[in-house]
Image (spheres, rainbow, N blue to C red):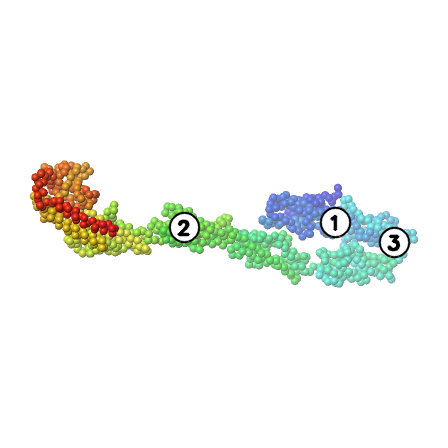
Amino acid sequence: MRVYLMVFCLICCTVDGQVVYSIAEEAERGASVGNIAKDLGIDAATLSARKFRMITGSSKQYFNINASTGAVSVEEPIDREQLCELKSACFLNYELVLENPLELYRMEFKVLDINDNSPSFPLSEYHINVPEFLSPGARFTLPNAQDLDEGTNSVQNYTLSPDEHFSLEMQTRGDGSKYPELVLKKALDREQQATHKLVLTAKDGGDPPKSGDVLVIVTVLDTNDNAPEFEYSVYRASILENSTSGTLVVQVHATDLDEGPNGEIRYSFSNTTSADLQRMFLIHPLTGEVTVNGVLAVQRPLLEMLIEARDNGAFGMSSTAKLLVEITDVNNHGPEITVTSLSSPIPEDAVPGTVIALLSIMDKDPGENGKVTCQIPDNLPFQLKPSLGNYYSLVTSGLLDRELISGYNITITATDLGSPPITTQKALWVQISDVNDNPPVFSADTFDVFVEENNPLGAFLYQISASDPDIGENGRISYTLRNSTVAGSALASFLSVSLANGSIYATRAFDFEQLRSFYFQVEAKDNGSPALSAAITVNVYISDQNDNAPTILYPISQNGSIAVEVVPRLADEDYLVTKVVADDEDNAQNAWLSYHLAHSSDSTLFRLSSHSGELRTTRSMRSTDFLKHKVVVVVRDHGDPPLSSTVTVGILLADTLPQALPDFDDSGEPPPLLNATNIYLIVSLACVSCIFAAFLLFLAIVRLCSCQTCCCSCCCPADEYEKYRYSVHMLPSSHLPPDVLEITGMGKLTHTYLYRASVGLGPSNSSSPNGDAGNIPSGSRLQVPGPCIQVQQVQSDRLSAVLVVLNRRQLRLKRPPPPPSAQQLEQEKADPASPGPSSFLLLLFFLLLLLPGAAAVSGSR
């Protein structure tokens, strides 16, 4: 197989981020060059994720990197001769850029020459005119063959086809280059042979070697046996690259020993000089001046041309000299700034030294004119660091804070070292991305919230607001209550907070009397990752409402009964009857209490202190004052609206504490207001009562006259007590104490009372009970003084009384008299004082008079 189809790849070195590969030209597409991941120690699996890319200044992409394995292969076959022209060493430079983190590696591919080009001559044939009179040893310059290969693959030697008149010799110029010469070995005889055809073969040193042939036609002339000679075999000149057209480069000079036309010399570029250089420069044919023709559009600093001097003889002879033109660079190119890679935005928490961008700064000028200095403003937290070759890294040099500056406009200034220097600027916009580096901030350390008690459920209390200078999710705040307890209950049973806006709502009605203040913490948390939070203490103060009426602590009524205070019968003025003590669970003015006398059975007898609640007498007691009094005390707070409580106090005028307290239910009630109906009823009742009282008085007189014999048995004097007779049935009772008798009576009464009275039984009376109510005979009668009986309870129309036996000696039992005889009945009928049928008719008449009044009362009601 052909050698140039074989691929020889060798990893030469990997030093300071640079890898050098060697590859033969004309390698087939897909031929392996090496493994960049293995050679650089990079994980091949991360190449795609790190967005690798190859950067080169060449117009073609000759190599490819497999993203999965990191293998470097040939993408496009390389023609070294086309790529590097006449350069002795051919290199292709690539830069491998990796991101995350940003890394740069230099890749250099040395293209090895293979013997793929044969030596060739500019012309297909050369003509040489040789005068016949030349003696052996004459020399004629032969054309040089060109071979685009380098080294041993270039032209190594020349051979000439065998001829008896000519031989081939190699000559060396002053610069060391070699060229072939045709040497005359034997004198020519034009008459014998006018033309000699020789084949000049150029061979290279390849394996196998390649060769190129050219036909050399030698024409034997009879004239002009001297060739022009240059003063110098090599001419050197230097011009500026921006030289204008017509600028003189150099003037060459040659001499010819011949005379006449054979000594006249004309100058021209040799055919071996490239056509580009012949268009770029002009040579005057007579003077030998070489001038610039147009623009010097070359990248090579040294140009090589061959100048030929030929005489005007019939058989013109020529010689050649080499012209080397050095192009002196001028600073006519400004630096070119190319952003190879840019990371924007960058997080604000990027540490100093983070690579932001990779810049390529080049200047096409060579030497000092191509050297560039690069800088950025000093007031920015960035700096430029030189990287490989003409690359610079833009890195951070300080801490970034997006909340202060959200982006930077970085102006990169590149200046070359030419004279005058040329400056180029390029602006980069680097945006700073937000990170969650700021927790929420409250405007105060604590918040005080005031709320009235008895608030409705769900009432808005307060809105807490926190700020976060971060943006997006990092700055979106949510609010929550921190877990805690209030008065032994979970905080959530008292309050709730809006997750979005921090509004606090009450989930229950507050009671100032149970809870006057409490505190809790609200946490504000952003939605960053990781989330940052801050907490604030909220103090809740519950303000009082007048929702509690005063509570009477003293005096206290039990079971609905009236509290009774005992006052000496003849108490002095300003005597302290009692002190009303009250309390209000409210606060401040809602708990300021004042005492007022709402009702008093005798307004002239008592007064009440509005501040202390002391009930005192306004004057000294008199014997004519009622024994029982009732006052109603109102305790009122100063709320808005005010609330009040009342207490009824019964006042008993007594020098000693009684064993049984009287009933104050009906005591001290004011008389009803008079109206027409009541006046009519009162007048009617008064008339009827007067008539009926007169009738009863009459009956009483008659009875008293008949019963004077029985009056002596009364236990109380006749002048102090009016005697009353009660038909009493002494019933045995097992549920009463031994000193209590249950007495039952019959009568048409409006109420039945339970009496407690002091009655006595004589111990010597054989008919009296012996300490047991059960021993009283059934149907016996008791005579009890009326003033000694007190009403205790009303039950029905049947009279029932309980007699407490304090002293059995005072109780006398009277047996009922025997039934009257017929004679006694007749005597009673004849007695005019005894009531007869007329008496009952008169009573019925008076009752009928009461019916209209009763009907009127019923109608008014």
Q: Nearer the viewer, residue 718 or 494?
A: 718
Crowd band around label 3 with a 10 angstrom C-alpha radius: few (<14), some (14–19), many (20+): some
Horizontal placement of 23 versus 158: left or right? left
For image coordinates 37% across by 49% down, the residue present is 509
Q: Residue 803: where, in percent of width, then height?
A: 16, 42
- Element type at marker 1? loop
Which residue is labeled 1 in the image?
A: 150
Crowd band around label 2 with a 10 angstrom C-alpha radius: few (<14), some (14–19), many (20+): some
Which quadrant of the figure contains the N terminus?
Answer: top right
For image coordinates 47% across by 54% down, the residue present is 467
Numbered disc in front, either 2 or 1: 2
Numbered disc in front, either 2 or 3: 2
First of labels 1, 3 by sequence position: 1
Q: Residue 247: where, in percent of width, then height?
A: 74, 63
First of labels 2, 1 by sequence position: 1
Q: Nearer the viewer, residue 277 or 777?
A: 777
The label shown at residue 219 is: 3
For image coordinates 69% across by 48% down, the residue present is 62
Amino acid identity at mark 2 = Gly
Q: CA distance from mark 2 to mark 1?
A: 95 Å
Horizontal placement of 838 versus 495: left or right? left
